[in-house]
Image (cartoon, rainbow, N blue to C red):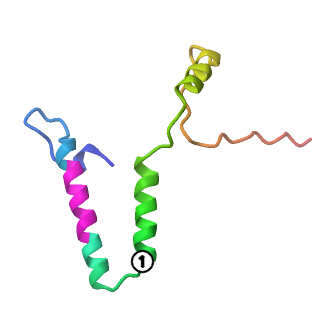
Amino acid sequence: MSPEEFDLDENGNVNWRLAWHKEIGHLQTLTAEQEKAGVDSEWYRMMLFRIRSAVILPPMNPEMMHAMASHMPANAQPPTGEIPQQQQPVQP
């Protein structure tokens, strides 16, 4: 997503509140279209879990976060969720 896709406020900044409300409106429209098409309950289940997994992270134990942070080097980057690629051994 690029800033050009969003409405800007009077200062030229992305209006995130408006973008959020538009996205919720799109989801409501999509749901209404699916209902008209006679979608079954599996679609609702799938959408619910997709939305929840996208916006709700599992709770982290604050003590565990502190312990993890104390063992990380000062210049370490936070995890990105990407799986690091292993280097392949050089073949002679």
The reply, left or right, for residue 49 in relation to residue 77 is: left
Identify residue for label 1. Answer: 41
Number of labels in the image equals 1
User: Which quadrant of the figure contains the C terminus?
Assistant: top right
Residue at 66% in and 39% down: 84
In this view, the residue farthest toward the left is 10
Residue at 79% in and 42% down: 88
Prevalent SS, magenta region: helix
Give the image location of residue 49, x and y in percent: 46, 60
The reply, left or right, for residue 9 in relation to residue 36 is: left
> Please, what is the three-letter code of the amino acid marked with disc 1?
Ser
Towards the viewer: 18 or 32? 32
The reply, left or right, for residue 86 in relation to residue 10 is: right
Does 3 appear above or below 26? above
- Highlighted magenta segment, given as a residue range: 19-29
Q: Is residue 6 visible?
A: no
Give the image location of residue 36, x and y in percent: 27, 84
Does 7 appear above or below 41? above
Is residue 11 located in the magenta-colored stretch of the structure? no
Image quadrant in which you'd find residue 11: top left
Towards the viewer: 34 or 86? 34
Give the image location of residue 81, x and y in percent: 56, 41
Kind of element beneath mark 1: helix
